[in-house]
Image (cartoon, rainbow, N blue to C red):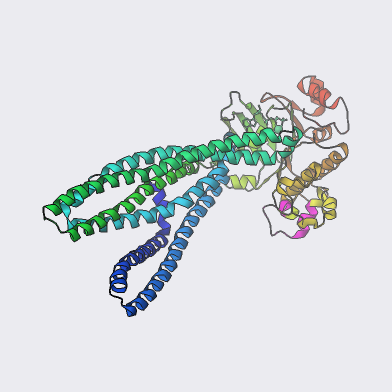
C-alpha cells in the first residue's frame, strides 16, 4: 500500500482537484433532489407559474454545471491514471535494459512484457479512481454520520453497529480478491507469452500445420484467464452484496426501534424521516468504500508483481574507465549458468594480447559463445577472474569495456528501423558517408542500393524482409561502423549457401583486417570459427571441449598433436583446405 501511495503522491494535485469536482457533482445531484420538494409544493400544489420559469432555468444551469464538472473530474482522474501507468512503464523498461543477462536466461520475456503492459494497465484503471473515492467517500460518510448523530445519536449507533462487521467481511474478501487478481495477472502474462511466441514462430507453426492445435492451446489459456477474471468479478461484487445485506439489517432495525420511539412520542415523525434519509445515504458511500478496498487490493496485486521485477538487482558495474584494451586474461575461470548442473566453462586460462587473433573451435555446446560472452562482461565468472589490462573485469565500467568491443553474434538481431539506423546503431547522427563505407566493406552496399528506399528502407520486425546472408552482412556492417579495437565474431554460416557464404566471408575478412574500410589494423579478435580460412588466419587456435581448453596452438601444431583438433578438422572440413562446408561443428 505504501508503494501505491508513492505512485499516486506526485499526482495529488490532480486527484485532489478531481475530488473537489466530484464533491460539486454530488452537490448538484443533491440540489436536484432538493428541488423536488419546492417543485411539488409550489408548482403543483400552489400553481406558481413564475416559480416554474425560475425552476426550469435553475435545472438547466445545474445540469450544465454537473456535466462540466463531471467532464473535468473524469479527465483529471483518467489523466492521473494514465500518467501513473506511463511512469511505471518507463521505469520498468529502463530497469529491464539494465538487468543482467543472467536474468534473461531464467525468465521469459513474455512475462516481463506482461508486467509492463497488463499490470500497468490494471493500475492505470484502478489506482487514481480508488484514491479519489477513498477521500470523497470517507468525507461524505463522516459528514452524514455527524448529521445523523446530531439528530439522534442513539439511533445512529444502532444503525451503524452493523457497519464494522460489514467492513470486516468486505476486507476479508479483499484479501481473497488480491490472490485471485494475482492469478489472473499470471494468466494474462501466459497469454502475452503465447502471443509473442506464436506470432514470431508463425512459420514453424505453418510448416507443421499446427495452426488449429496452437489456436486451441491459446483458447484454453484464454479460457483460464476468463475464469479467473470472473472469479474476481464475483468477489468484487460480493462486497457490495454484503453492504446491501447489512444495510438492510441496520435499516430494518432502526425502522423498528425508531417507530416504537414515535409511538412513545419521544421523537417526531419529521425528525425520524430526516434521520432515516441520512442513514440511508450513508450506505451508498460505505458500499463504494468497500469497493475502494477491493480495487486497492487488485492494484496492489499488480504492484507486487511489478515490484518483484523492479527489485531484481541491475547488472553490477565497476567504475574504472578503460581507455584501451591491451590484454585480456582468463585466470582459472569457471562459469555455470543459473539453474544448470554442469559448468559451461571450467578452469579456463587464457591470455590474449592486443592485435592477436584467437580462433575458438569446439563441438556444439562446448562453451565457445559463453567464453566470449564473459569477455564482453555479459556474465561474471562463477569462480576465477578475468583481467583486462590486469584489472579485474568486475571493477571495470561496463560501458567503457563494451564501447571497445564489437560483436557479430550467432543470431543476428536487427531493430525495426531503417537500414542506416541499424548500421549506425548508437550514433544516429553519424554522417551518411560513414554508414555507406561500413556497408561497402561488409558487402552490403550493393543490395541496399537496390532496395526501393536504399539506406532509408525500414526493416520489418526482426528483419523478415531480408535474407539470412543480407542480415548477417548488415550486422557485420554495424561492427565495421563501430570500428572497435576488440572484435568478437561468432560465425554462423550454416544457414547460407556457398555463394552468400563467400560474400559474408569476405565481409568478415574486411572487418578482421580492417582493409576496405580504412579501419585500424591492430584489432584484437576472438573468432568462433567454423571456416578453415578463418581458423588458419588466427595467431592461435583454442580448442574447447565440455567447457575446458583441451588444446591450444597453431593449425600445424594442432594437426601434429593428432587429438581433438585433428578430429574436429577432419569431421568438419573433411580435410578440405579452402572454404569449409560450414555447419555446426
Ligand atoms: N543462456 C543460457 N542459459 C543456460 N545455459 C546455457 C545458456 N547458454 C548456453 N548454455 C549452456 O551452456 C553450454 C555452452 O553453451 P555455448 O552456447 O557456450 O556453446 P557453443 O560452444 O557456443 O555451441 P555452438 O557451437 O552450438 O554455438 C551448453 O551446454 C548450453 O546448453
Ligand atoms: Mg555458440
Residue nearer the viewer, 529 or 301? 301
In magenta stretch: residue 427: yes
Q: Residue furthest bottom?
A: 50
- Residue 109 can be seen in this image: no
Q: Is 566 rendered above or below residue 285?
A: above
Residue nearer the viewer, 499 or 368? 499
Residue 421 left/right relative to 396: right
Quick check: which quadrant has ligand 1?
top right
Q: Which residues are magenta?
A: 421-438
Residue 220 left/right relative to 567: left
Residue nearer the viewer, 311 or 356? 311
Residue sitting at x 43%, y 71%: 64
- Residue 494 can be seen in this image: yes
Where does the C terminus fall, quadrant-wise? top right
> Could you tell me residue 344's position as x and y percent?
63, 27
Q: Is 253 rendered above or below residue 497?
A: below
Q: Residue furthest top?
A: 562
> Could you tell me residue 413's position as x and y percent?
70, 44
> Could you tell me residue 180's position as x and y percent?
45, 38
Residue 92 left/right relative to 168: right
Q: How many marks?
A: 0
In magenta stretch: residue 234: no
**Residue 12 in which image quadrant:** bottom left
> Could you tell me residue 253's position as x and y percent?
22, 46
Residue sitting at x 40%, y 56%: 9
Amino acid at each position: 500500500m505504501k508503494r501505491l501511495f508513492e505512485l499516486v503522491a506526485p499526482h495529488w494535485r490532480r486527484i485532489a482537484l478531481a475530488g473537489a469536482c466530484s464533491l460539486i457533482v454530488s452537490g448538484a445531484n443533491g440540489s436536484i433532489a432538493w428541488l423536488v420538494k419546492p417543485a411539488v409544493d409550489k408548482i403543483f400544489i400552489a400553481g406558481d407559474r413564475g416559480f416554474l420559469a425560475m425552476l426550469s432555468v435553475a435545472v438547466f444551469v445545474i445540469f450544465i454545471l454537473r456535466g462540466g464538472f463531471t467532464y473535468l473530474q473524469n479527465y483529471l482522474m483518467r489523466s492521473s491514471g494514465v500518467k501513473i501507468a506511463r511512469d511505471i512503464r518507463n521505469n520498468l523498461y529502463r530497469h529491464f535494459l539494465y538487468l543482467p543477462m543472467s536474468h534473461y536466461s531464467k525468465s521469459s520475456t513474455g512475462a516481463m512484457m506482461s508486467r509492463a503492459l497488463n499490470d500497468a494497465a490494471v493500475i492505470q484503471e484502478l489506482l487514481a479512481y480508488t484514491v479519489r473515492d477513498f477521500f470523497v467517500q470517507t468525507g461524505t460518510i463522516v459528514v452524514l454520520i455527524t448529521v445523523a448523530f446530531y439528530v439522534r445519536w442513539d439511533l445512529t449507533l444502532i444503525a451503524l453497529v452493523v457497519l464494522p462487521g460489514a467492513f470486516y467481511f468486505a476486507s476479508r474478501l479483499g484479501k481473497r480478491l488480491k490472490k485471485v487478481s494475482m492469478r489472473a495477472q499470471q494468466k494474462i502474462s501466459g497469454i502475452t507469452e503465447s502471443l509473442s511466441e506464436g506470432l514470431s514462430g508463425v512459420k514453424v507453426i505453418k510448416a507443421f500445420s499446427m495452426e488449429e492445435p496452437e489456436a486451441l492451446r491459446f483458447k484454453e489459456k484464454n479460457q483460464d484467464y476468463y475464469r479467473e477474471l470472473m472469479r474476481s468479478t464475483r468477489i468484487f461484487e460480493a462486497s457490495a452484496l454484503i453492504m446491501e445485506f447489512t444495510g438492510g439489517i441496520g435499516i430494518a432495525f432502526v425502522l423498528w426501534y425508531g417507530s416504537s420511539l414515535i409511538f412513545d412520542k419521544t421523537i417526531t415523525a419529521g425528525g425520524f424521516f430526516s434521520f432515516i434519509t441520512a442513514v440511508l445515504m450513508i450506505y451508498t458511500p460505505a458500499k463504494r468504500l468497500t469497493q475502494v478496498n477491493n480495487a486497492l487490493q487488485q492494484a496492489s496485486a499488480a504492484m507486487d508483481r511489478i515490484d518483484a521485477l523492479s527489485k531484481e538487482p541491475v547488472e553490477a558495474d565497476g567504475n574504472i574507465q578503460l581507455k584501451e584494451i591491451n590484454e585480456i586474461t582468463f585466470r582459472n575461470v569457471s562459469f555455470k549458468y543459473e539453474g544448470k548442473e554442469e559448468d559451461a566453462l571450467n578452469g579456463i586460462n587464457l591470455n590474449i594480447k592486443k592485435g592477436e587473433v584467437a580462433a575458438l573451435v569446439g563441438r556444439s555446446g562446448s562453451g565457445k559463445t559463453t567464453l566470449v560472452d564473459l569477455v564482453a562482461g555479459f556474465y561474471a565468472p562463477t569462480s576465477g577472474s578475468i583481467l583486462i589490462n590486469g584489472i579485474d573485469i568486475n571493477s571495470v565500467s561496463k560501458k567503457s569495456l563494451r564501447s571497445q568491443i564489437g560483436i557479430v553474434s550467432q543470431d543476428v538481431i536487427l531493430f525495426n528501423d531503417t537500414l542506416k539506423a541499424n548500421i549506425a546503431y548508437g550514433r544516429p547522427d553519424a554522417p551518411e558517408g560513414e554508414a555507406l563505407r561500413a556497408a561497402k566493406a561488409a558487402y552490403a552496399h550493393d543490395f541496399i542500393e537496390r532496395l526501393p528506399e536504399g539506406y532509408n528502407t525500414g526493416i520489418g520486425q526482426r528483419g523478415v524482409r531480408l535474407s539470412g546472408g543480407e542480415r548477417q552482412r548488415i550486422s557485420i556492417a554495424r561492427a565495421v561502423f563501430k570500428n572497435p579495437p576488440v572484435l568478437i565474431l561468432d560465425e554462423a554460416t550454416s544457414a547460407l549457401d556457398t555463394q552468400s557464404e563467400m560474400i559474408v566471408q569476405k565481409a568478415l575478412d574486411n572487418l578482421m583486417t580492417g582493409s576496405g574500410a580504412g579501419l585500424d589494423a591492430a584489432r584484437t579478435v576472438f573468432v568462433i570459427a567454423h571456416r578453415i580460412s578463418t581458423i588458419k588466419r588466427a595467431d592461435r587456435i583454442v580448442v574447447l571441449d565440455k567447457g575446458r581448453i583441451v588444446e591450444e596452438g597453431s593449425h600445424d601444431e594442432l594437426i601434429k598433436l593428432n587429438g581433438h583438433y585433428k578430429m574436429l578438422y577432419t569431421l568438419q572440413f573433411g580435410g578440405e583446405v579452402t572454404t569449409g562446408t560450414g555447419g555446426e561443428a
